C-alpha cells in the first residue's frame, strides 16, 4: 500500500545513501547478503559497508564484467550479491556476463546502475546511459525497475533480496524529490496510479514521475484532466493496468529518462498495439542520439525532459 507525500518539494535522502543503509540493514538479518563494487566505493558510499561489514564486501576494481562473474560465483555458493557501478558499465559493458553467467546459468545478480541518462551530468556522453533498460529487458525473466524516490528504492532493494534471478534497478546517486510516504510498499509487476484523470494518461518511471505529476496538475488548471501512473517496474510490466487506463483516453504519453527505443515507451506501446487499443500515443524520451556533458538540470532541459516540455507536447497533440 502506497500513499503520496503532502509536499513533493521535499528532497529525499540520496539514492546511494539509501542503498547503503538498506544493505547494512539486510546484512544484520541475512548473512547471505554481500556487496560488490567496481572501484566506485567512495562515490557510491559502499566503502561504509566495507568498514561495517568487511567480510561481506568485495572490491572488484575497474573490471565490471569480472564483477558480474564474481557475483555469479557467489550466487552459486548460496550468497545474494548486490553490485553497483555506473549504469552503462553495469549493463552494456558487462552484458554478456550478466546474460550468460547470470541469466542463462540461473544465478542471482542484484544490480544497481547509477546515474542513468541526464543524471550522469559532467561525466559526459560516455556515461549517459540511454539504453540500459532496453538491454536488461531483453534478458529472459529479468526484473527491471526505475526508482522514483528513496522510499521506493529502499523497498526495491529489500524486495530483490527475497528473489532469485537477474534484478536491475536504475537511479541517480543523488537525491530526488520525494513522492511517497516512508511507510509505502509496492508490488513487482504492478504500476501505481498517482493521480486520476479522464482525458490524458501519462505513464512515467524514475525521478521523472515528479515531472509528470507537475505537468498533470498544471493541465488540470487548464481544463485537461490528466492521469499519472508510476510504472516503476518496467519488466514485468503491468499490462492489465495499461489496458484498463488507456481505454477511453484521448491521448497516452510516456515520459522517461531513457531512449524512446526499447525502454518504458516501447514496453507500453507493445501492450497497446498487441491488444488493439485505438488511442493517440506518443513517447517522450531521448530521441535516437548520444548524450553530452553538462549539469543534470541543463541536460534535462536540453533533452526536453521537463514538465514544461511534456505539457507543451500534450497540448499540441491533444488539440490535433
Image: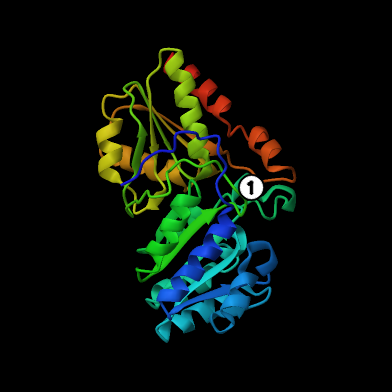
- Image vertical order of residue 235 relative to residue 205, above or below: below
Q: Position of residue 99 (x, y in %)?
A: 46, 70
In which quarter of the view is residue 4 placed? top left
Residue 137 visible in the displayed image: no
Q: Please identify the quadrant where the C terminus is shown.
A: top left
Count neighbours of disc 1 (C-alpha within 10 A) and say few if under 14, some if 14 to 19, many if 20 or more. many
Q: Which residue is mark 1?
A: 119
Find residue 97 and report its horizontal and vertical position in percent: 52, 74
**Which residue is painted at 58% across and 31% down in the image?**
306
Q: Is residue 52 above or below residue 134?
A: below
Compared with residue 57, is residue 14 higher up or lower down, i.e. above or below? above
User: Measuring 55% from the left and 65% from the top, which residue is drawn there?
Assistant: 20
Where is residue 222? Give x, y as percent: 45, 13
Which is nearer the eye, 75 or 103? 75
Which picture quadrant has residue 66? bottom right
- Residue at (74, 43) in percent of width and height: 294
Q: Is 290 on the left-hand or right-hand side of 279?
A: right
* Residue 219 in view, yes or no: yes
**Mark 1 secondary-structure assignment:** helix
> What residue lies at 70% left-to-right and 47% top-to-bottom?
121
Residue 286 is situated, as x and y percent measured from the top left of the image, at 58, 40
- Within the image, what quadrant is residue 273 found in? top left
Q: How is the protein colored in the picture?
A: rainbow
301 horizontally vs 91: left or right: right
Amino acid at each position: 500500500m502506497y500513499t503520496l507525500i503532502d509536499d513533493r518539494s521535499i528532497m529525499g535522502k540520496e539514492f546511494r545513501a539509501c542503498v547503503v543503509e538498506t544493505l547494512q540493514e539486510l546484512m544484520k538479518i541475512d548473512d547471505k547478503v554481500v556487496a560488490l563494487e567496481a572501484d566506485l566505493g567512495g562515490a557510491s558510499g559502499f566503502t561504509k559497508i566495507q568498514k561495517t561489514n568487511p567480510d561481506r564486501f568485495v572490491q572488484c576494481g575497474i573490471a565490471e564484467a569480472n564483477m558480474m562473474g564474481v557475483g555469479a560465483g557467489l550466487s552459486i555458493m548460496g550468497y545474494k550479491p548486490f553490485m553497483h557501478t555506473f549504469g552503462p558499465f553495469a549493463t552494456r559493458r558487462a552484458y554478456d556476463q550478466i546474460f550468460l553467467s547470470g541469466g542463462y546459468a540461473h544465478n542471482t545478480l542484484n544490480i544497481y546502475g547509477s546515474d542513468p541518462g541526464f543524471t550522469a551530468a559532467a561525466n559526459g556522453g560516455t556515461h549517459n546511459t540511454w539504453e540500459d533498460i532496453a538491454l536488461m529487458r531483453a534478458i529472459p525473466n529479468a526484473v527491471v525497475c526505475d526508482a522514483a524516490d528513496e522510499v521506493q528504492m529502499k523497498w526495491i532493494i529489500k524486495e530483490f533480496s527475497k528473489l532469485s534471478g537477474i534484478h536491475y534497478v536504475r537511479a541517480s546517486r543523488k537525491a530526488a524529490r520525494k513522492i511517497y510516504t516512508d511507510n509505502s510498499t509496492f508490488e513487482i509487476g504492478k504500476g501505481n496510479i498517482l493521480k486520476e484523470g479522464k482525458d490524458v494518461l501519462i505513464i512515467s518511471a524514475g525521478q521523472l514521475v515528479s515531472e509528470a505529476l507537475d505537468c498533470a496538475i498544471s493541465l488540470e488548471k487548464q481544463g485537461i484532466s490528466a492521469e499519472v501512473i508510476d510504472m516503476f517496474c518496467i519488466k514485468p510490466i503491468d499490462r492489465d493496468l495499461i489496458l484498463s487506463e488507456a481505454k477511453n483516453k484521448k491521448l497516452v504519453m510516456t515520459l522517461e529518462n531513457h531512449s524512446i527505443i526499447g525502454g518504458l515507451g516501447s514496453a507500453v506501446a507493445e501492450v497497446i498495439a498487441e491488444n488493439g487499443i485505438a488511442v493517440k500515443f506518443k513517447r517522450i524520451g531521448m530521441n535516437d542520439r548520444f548524450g553530452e556533458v553538462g549539469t543534470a538540470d541543463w541536460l534535462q532541459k536540453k533533452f526536453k525532459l521537463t514538465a514544461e516540455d511534456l505539457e507543451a507536447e500534450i497540448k499540441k497533440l491533444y488539440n490535433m
